Image (tube, rainbow, N blue to C red):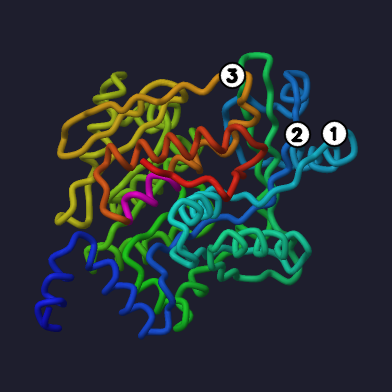
């Protein structure tokens, strides 16, 4: 076959554009980076707790909060009195690790966040890069790497309570992404993912990346992250969602953002309302994805609501639901990057979550391969 005909034949093949895009990134010296995540890199301290522990530190099952002054004393208490398992955490970094694991192509994902200059940041970097994620941290010399207590309880079913002490993570500044070598990455990737948690850290960074995504017609994803983000920081969240092409959340978070904002209690109607919030990039209609534990995942596309069933996972093999949401998002993004439809993306998200909840923290058997 003549060379010209061979190239023409190649270009007509599905996903040939992905190969050409990879060549473009290599020429630019940016590796194969395709998605940039920005968030709070945290060291997870996972323990098996009970109702008494939650009550002592004024925590709730299946909730996430930022630690107040009283709750910051909990970390030493856990290290001294419980069998603590340390693992790399932080919502966005977790999702990118899962995405990278499923895609199997190193450095598809690049992550930026702020850490201390300590052994914990070294552990986070080593874990992420061993999983194939390129990390570009902003380092804080006098502030420790952030931590997140993940308390697993079983007295009301398998549930988790998260309490984060952001520490160095909350010192991230927009100057980090504006460094020429970093902003080159911001401009060249094709997709972005930022969690709602990051709203408390650097909303100006969210807006800047959102503007780049909108101007260049690239995909910008956000996660509602936690009920307190949807209530206490609702105004900033709505301003950030202005740039969002894909919004992830769970039922509790969706209900929280709807309170006082939408005149409905119907989850399907709430999802449609979120999809119809003001939007910067009019070339893309917003997609909304709402998870509900073992119940079907609800999603909105083109103002139409659909559901995708969640394959059951026996209670006896569930170890820790802490990383389920992060894993779901990572699985979803992995398939979106290779051009799969939304239902296929959700199915992969469900699969990734089902694997992660059988382990402590957001961990998985790297040898497993998704075949959906």
- Any magenta on residue 211? no
Q: What element carries label 3?
A: helix
Q: Is mark 1 on a helix, strand or loop?
A: loop
Placement of 2 over or under 173, stated as above or below:
below
Residue at 27%, 62% (x, y): give it: 218
- For the image, the number of numbered tags is 3
- Any magenta on residue 334? yes
Residue at 11%, 74% (x, y): give it: 8
Task: Kindly indicate the quadrant of the structure image that contains residue 203.
Answer: bottom left
Residue at 46%, 21% (x, y): give it: 312
**Magenta residues?**
330-337
In the rendered image, which residue does mark 1 sit on? 82
User: Residue 200, image x and y in percent?
Assistant: 52, 51
Measured Cα–Cα span from mark 2 to mark 3: 18 Å
Q: Residues within 10 Å of mark 2 (few under 14, many from 20)?
A: many
In the rendered image, which residue does mark 3 sit on? 315
Left/right placement of residue 185 relative to residue 326 reads left
User: Residue 111, image x and y in percent?
Assistant: 51, 63
Residue at 11%, 82% (x, y): give it: 2
Q: How crowded is mark 1: few (under 14 residues within 10 Å), some or many (20 or more)?
A: few
Placement of 207 over or under 358, stated as above or below:
below
| Quadrant, the N terminus | bottom left
User: Residue 322, image x and y in percent?
Assistant: 60, 35
């Amino acid at each position: 076959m003549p060379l010209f005909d061979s190239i023409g034949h190649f270009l007509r093949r599905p996903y040939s554009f992905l190969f050409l895009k990879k060549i473009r990134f290599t020429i630019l010296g940016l590796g194969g980076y395709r998605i940039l995540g920005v968030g709070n890199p945290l060291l997870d301290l996972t323990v098996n707790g009970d109702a008494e522990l939650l009550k002592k530190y004024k925590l709730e099952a299946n909730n996430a909060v930022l630690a107040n002054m009283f709750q910051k004393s909990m970390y030493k208490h856990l290290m001294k009195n419980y069998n603590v398992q340390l693992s790399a955490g932080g919502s966005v970094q977790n999702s990118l690790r899962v995405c990278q694991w499923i895609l199997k192509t190193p450095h598809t994902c690049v992550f930026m966040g702020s850490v201390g200059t300590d052994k914990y940041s070294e552990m986070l970097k080593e874990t992420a890069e061993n999983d194939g994620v390129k990390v570009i941290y902003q380092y804080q010399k006098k502030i420790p790497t952030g931590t997140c207590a993940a308390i697993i309880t079983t007295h009301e079913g398998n549930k988790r309570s998260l309490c984060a002490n952001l520490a160095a993570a909350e010192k991230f500044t927009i100057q980090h992404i504006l460094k020429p070598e970093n902003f080159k990455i911001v401009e060249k990737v094709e997709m972005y993912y930022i969690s709602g948690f990051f709203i408390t850290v650097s909303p100006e960074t969210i807006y800047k990346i959102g503007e780049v995504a909108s101007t260049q017609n690239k995909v910008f994803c956000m996660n509602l992250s936690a009920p307190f983000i949807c209530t206490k920081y609702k105004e900033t969240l709505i301003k950030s969602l202005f740039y969002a092409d894909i919004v992830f959340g769970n039922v509790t978070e969706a209900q929280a953002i709807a309170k006082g904002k939408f005149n409905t209690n119907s989850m399907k109607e709430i999802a449609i309302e979120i999809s119809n919030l003001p939007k910067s990039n009019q070339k893309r209609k917003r997609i909304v994805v709402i998870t509900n534990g073992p119940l079907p995942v609800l999603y909105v596309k083109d103002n139409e609501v659909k559901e995708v069933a969640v394959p059951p996972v026996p209670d006896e093999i569930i170890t820790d639901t802490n990383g389920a949401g992060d894993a779901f998002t990572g699985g979803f993004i992995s398939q979106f990057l290779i051009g799969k439809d939304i239902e296929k993306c959700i199915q992969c998200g469900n699969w990734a979550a089902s694997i992660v909840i059988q382990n402590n923290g957001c961990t998985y058997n790297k040898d497993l391969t998704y075949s959906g």
